[in-house]
Image (cartoon, rainbow, N blue to C red):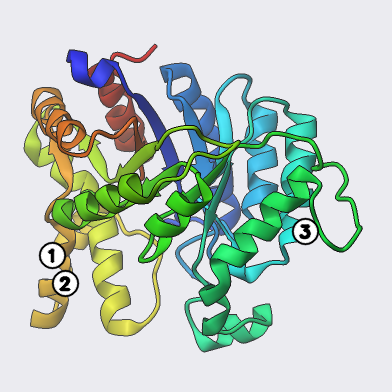
Amino acid sequence: MTSVLSSIRFSVLDRSRVREGHDASEALRDTVRLAQEVESLGYHRFWVSEHHGVPGVAGSAPTVLAAAVASATRSIRVGTGGVMLPNHRPLVVAEQFGVLESLFPGRIDMGLGRSVGFTDGVRKALGRDKDDADDFAGQLDELLGWFRGTSPTGVHARPPEGLAVPPFVLAMGEGASIAARAGLPMVIGDLRNREKMRRGIDRYRAEFRPSPWAEEPYVVVSGTVAVADTPEAARRILLPEAWAMAYSRTHGTFPPLAPAEEVERRVMTAKDRGFYEAGLSGHVYGTEEQVAHELESVVKETGAQEVLVTTSTYDREALLGSYGRLARVAGLG
């Protein structure tokens, strides 16, 4: 543990990744169990994500999954990373988070993103199109208005009106400026492109306007972190996700995670191999000492107040072991 790392928060985002030989229902139960485990380790938040029509991801209804996680835990903050606001009516999103906050007061976070469905088919099924992301700032303002009770329609949202559910903006592209102008905390990734991350953070801080939600800028940096007894063992944690990402780049669909030993045996084309190797680069991984040094550099470079860890892998024991070692690095507990 270092003094730099002990002064910031560490949290977890789990994408409910499906594993080869296992089904989506098991992936969702794995997410709930992981939340219980990282709560016992002392992590600050546990967030779930939104994906539609993806074979390798089970988390399609984040507020529903967040309710299951909150029910199974006692103290850890629970939220979304995030609900993709262009996919939904802001009133419905406000109502969902209002219900969550009413059931689990003081524990709910509202992480919001501006992505729409990844494919034409998914967007059509959702009744959306690519242009719907262009009005994210307006959608965000409408959503927050339901909590403030300032909707011009004369309708009052129940139960969200008057509740304080902390909003966070996932900063992709224009997200940094949108978060800054709205005066909201910002989540930015990934750790593989530090220069781009710093530019986004600098932009956010320069344009930040205080709001009832946040008086000062609040930066959460997100990315993959893997910790093991050896650098080689930590790198093996990364293999399943790197292969799935490479496969998605060349086949257009994101598959379930394969065991690391199976990934190592697979024959890849030169193109696949290039994407695969790129997917393994830039992450924070290694022994506790190595990861502590690297994370300390990240925090000093970015001035972040929080690290959101987004690691996915096939081996659940290795994943939990990594989070346990990272908890020691961060001085949690």
Residue identified by numbered label 1: 278
Q: Few, some or many C-alpha atoms within 10 Å of disc 3 (few <14, some 14-19, many ≥20)? A: few
Could you tell me which residue is drawn at 15 percent across and 28 percent down? 296
Residue identified by numbered label 3: 92
Query: Nearer the observer, disc 2 or disc 3?
Result: 3
Could you tell me which residue is drawn at 36 percent across and 28 percent down? 10
Could you tell me which residue is drawn at 73 percent across and 66 percent down? 89
Q: Which residue is nearer to you in this view: 55 or 155?
A: 155
Q: Few, some or many C-alpha atoms within 10 Å of disc 1 (few <14, some 14-19, many ≥20)? A: some
**Residue 262 x, y percent position in the rendering:** 23, 59
The answer to whether residue 269 of the structure is visible from this angle is no
Q: Amino acid at mark 3?
A: Val
Q: Few, some or many C-alpha atoms within 10 Å of disc 2 (few <14, some 14-19, many ≥20)? A: many
**Residue 50 x, y percent position in the rendering:** 55, 59
Residue identified by numbered label 2: 275
Left or right? Give the position of 130 relative to 11.
Answer: right
Looking at the image, is mark 1 or mark 3 earlier in the sequence?
3
Question: What label does residue 113 carry, if any?
Answer: none
Q: Amino acid at mark 1?
A: Ala
Tell me: residue 108, above or below residue 145: above
Helix, strand or loop at mark 3: helix
Q: CA distance from mark 2 to mark 1?
A: 5 Å
Q: CA distance from mark 1 to mark 3?
A: 39 Å
Q: Are marks 2 and 1 in contact (CB under 8 Å)?
A: yes
Tell me: residue 182, above or below residue 52: above
The answer to whether residue 188 of the structure is visible from this angle is yes
Looking at the image, is mark 2 or mark 3 earlier in the sequence?
3
**Residue 17 x, y percent position in the rendering:** 45, 54
Q: Amino acid at mark 2?
A: Phe
Q: Quadrant of the C terminus?
A: top left
